[in-house]
Amino acid sequence: MNCAYCTAPAVQEQSRRTSLGYRVFRCSACQRTFNERTGSPFNFLEFPTDLVLLVVIWRLRYKLSLRDLAEMFLVRGLPFTHEAVREWEARFAPLIADRLRAKRRGKAGPSWYLDETYLKVKGRWCYLYRSHRSRRQLGRRAAQRETRPESGQALLEAGAGDGRPAAGAGDH
Ligand SMILES: [Zn+2]
């Protein structure tokens, strides 16, 4: 490990740990002390990094409200507020997405996302489908004046324009 401040390799691990159990090091070049999370986006979090990432991943993966997650962890003795969940999601969901994108680069075929929502147009309930290549590239591609969910399947099969997708991911 190199120093988190001056990047010198001359670091010694200390016997003490942080209150969350992270290893502490001292740099003999700049004399500063740092821990495993210093310089990372997770520095100064009140909870362990893996726990915070688990909360964010469950929030993205399952249909859990901010309050659901706070309550689920509270019963296991881990008290944090729904506002904390909101903040963690805002901070770390983009990091998780970037990591996943980097990991699958060159491996996966073309993929795209599909948003679905239900709205009223001229007094009639419609499904609105929106497809995009990535989350950064939000663009409305299709609106179907249908009240049947099968119309979304038609859009999936059409591959949103250029070729049948190798993978489609629902975005709710
Ligand atoms: Zn240093």
Image (cartoon, helix red, strand yellow):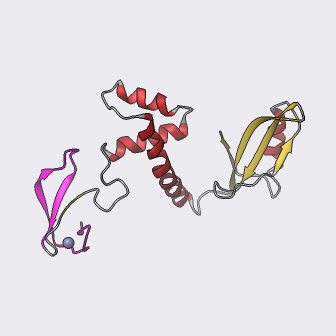
- Residue 46 in the image: x percent, y percent? 30, 44
- Outermost residue, top side: 75
* Boundaries of the magenta span: 1-28
Q: In the rendered view, does 58 fall on the left or right side of 139? A: left
The answer to whether residue 7 is magenta is yes
User: Against 25, is 93 above or below?
Assistant: above
Image quadrant in which the N terminus is located: bottom left
Q: Residue furthest left?
A: 15
Q: Quadrant of the C terminus?
A: top right
Residue at figure coordinates x 41%, y 40% from the top left:
84
Q: Percent x, y for residue 36? A: 25, 57
Which residue occupies the foreground of this view, 103 or 65? 65
On the image, which quarter does residue 80 sit in?
top left
Q: In the figure, is residue 152 to the left or right of 73? A: right
**Residue 128 occupies quadrant:** top right
Q: Quadrant of ligand 1?
A: bottom left
Q: Nearer the viewer, residue 15 or 74?
A: 74
Q: Is residue 4 above or below residue 130?
A: below
Q: Residue at x 71, y 43 (%)?
A: 115
Q: For the point 54% across and 41% down, which residue is it?
A: 60
Q: 63 or 45: which is nearer to us?
A: 45
Number of marks in picture: 0
| Residue 68 percent coordinates (x, y) | 48, 28
Q: Position of residue 35 (x, y in %)?
A: 22, 57
